[in-house]
Amino acid sequence: MLIRRETDEDIPAVRSVTSAAFSSAEAGASDREPVEVTLLDRLRADPGWIPELSLVATRPRNPGGATERPSVVGHVVCTRGWLADVPALGLGPLSVHPHHQRHGAGSALMHAVLAAAEARGERMVALLGEPAYYRRFGFRPAQDHGIEPPEASWGTYFQARLLAGAPFTAGAVFRYAEPFTRL
């Protein structure tokens, strides 16, 4: 498996992987496109899009197929968010094609995007997700860090990982890139 930056050529494959990953999660929703696909389209057009933090996981299409382009099996993105007036990152969506889940692609994408964020000097990454999964990557309930979720009902599912940098203003509410507000 190779983790690399997304290219324009990858966009259709990323859309397909994201659709497959989230369609399986939405029972009875197979006749409509998952909201995560629309969100990615909107994020790409938003000033908060950070191309260096849009990563894909690829695998060879066949064991000896050196001339054939590897297939995209997963994707993760971080976009510009804010904590009061301090720049931060919002992570998501993270998607792995159902046929490749539980084989390390999601973990590899998470480690890569967090390392890339830290290398850029980013100070904090926030996400909405399952605490049992994201805890292994150093995420904790955001409120443990004094960071408030955009929606109070998110509770412990809204998580943060502090990277390098100064502490944040306690009680500040995290703001995702604008397309998240249109979900």
Image (cartoon, rainbow, N blue to C red):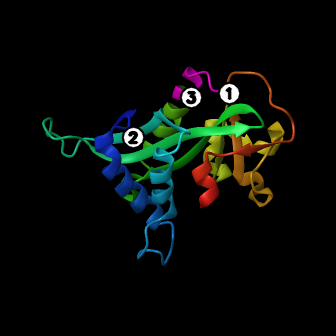
User: Which residue is identified by label 2?
Assistant: 56
Counting labels gives 3
Q: Which mark is residue 117?
A: 3
Precedes in sequence: disc 2 or disc 1: 2
Please identify the quarter of the rendering in which residue 78 is found: top right
| Mark-to-mark CA distance, 2 and 3 | 15 Å
Precedes in sequence: disc 2 or disc 3: 2
Per the image, label 3 sits on a secondary structure element best described as helix
Q: Which mark is residue 42?
A: none
Q: Given contact means CB atoms under 8 Å apart, are the residues at marks 3 and 1 in contact? A: no
Towards the viewer: 168 or 62: 168
Per the image, label 2 sits on a secondary structure element best described as strand
Q: Given contact means CB atoms under 8 Å apart, are the residues at marks 2 and 3 in contact? A: no
Q: In the rendered view, does 33 fall on the left or right side of 141?
A: left
Q: Which residue sits at x=41%, y=61%?
A: 19
Asked if residue 101 is positioned above or below residue 183 in the image, the reply reads above
Q: Amino acid at mark 1?
A: Arg
Which residues are the magenta region?
Answer: 116-123
Asked if residue 86 is positioned above or below residue 81 in the image, the reply reads above
User: Which residue is identified by label 1?
Assistant: 123
**Quadrant for the C terminus in the image:** bottom right
Image coordinates for residue 159, horizontal then vertical, percent = 70, 45
Per the image, label 1 sits on a secondary structure element best described as loop
Q: Which residue sits at x=47%, y=75%?
A: 29
Towards the viewer: 69 or 54: 54
Towards the viewer: 94 or 44: 44
Q: In the rendered view, does 179 fall on the left or right side of 146?
A: left
Q: Is residue 104 visible?
A: no
| Mark-to-mark CA distance, 3 and 1 | 8 Å
Q: Amino acid at mark 3?
A: Ala
Q: Residue furthest right?
A: 170
Image coordinates for residue 144, horizontal then vertical, percent = 82, 41
